[in-house]
Image (cartoon, rainbow, N blue to C red):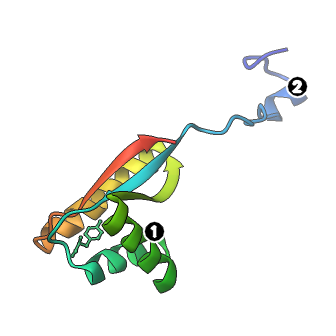
Amino acid sequence: EGPDRHGDAAVEEAKPRLKRPPMFKVMMLNDDYTPMDFVVEVLETFFRMDREQATRVMLTVHTRGKAVCGVYPQDIAETKAALVVDYAREHQHPLMCQVERA
Ligand code: TYC
């Protein structure tokens, strides 16, 4: 029995992958300059929120300093945070995201 047994039915059996990956929160941070409508657009585009959800999260960031935009495996969380920051820079906004262990 084991992963390197060959020559019979066992080679066709994949080991069940039941372990969930560690999850990471993408946090959006407040600043004084990024327009509210730009933040709402970012939340809709990169985090698949509807207008109402995106507006609620944006206002939470604005009033409390930061809020969770989504929770993902680490590579996806890091990629989303980087894409958002790049997109904001392209539009000359200082919007910031950070990734935290969930
Ligand atoms: N504080 C910004 C303003 O008053 C709006 C804002 C909201 C900026 C959320 C960043 O992540 C943010 N225009």
Location of residue 54 by image quarter:
bottom left
Label 1's element? helix
Residue at 36 percent across and 78 percent down: it is 40
Residue at 32 percent across and 49 percent down: it is 98
The residue labelled by disc 2 is 8
Amino acid at pointer 2: Asp
Q: Position of residue 97 (x, y in %)?
A: 30, 55
User: Is residue 42 shown left or right of residue 85?
Assistant: right
Picture layout, residue 102 above or below residue 81: above
The label on residue 66 is none
The residue labelled by disc 1 is 47
User: Is residue 80 shown left or right of residue 36?
Assistant: right
Gap between marks 2 and 1 measured at Cα: 46 Å
Q: Position of residue 95 (x, y in %)?
A: 22, 63
Residue at 27 percent across and 79 percent down: it is 36
Mark 2 beta carbon near ligand 1 (under 8 Å): no
Q: Position of residue 1 (x, y in %)?
A: 85, 14
Which is more toward the observer, 82 or 67? 67
Say which label, 2 or 1, has the lower sequence index.
2
Residue 85 visible to the viewer = yes
Residue 50 visible to the viewer = no
Which is more toward the observer, 11 or 67? 67
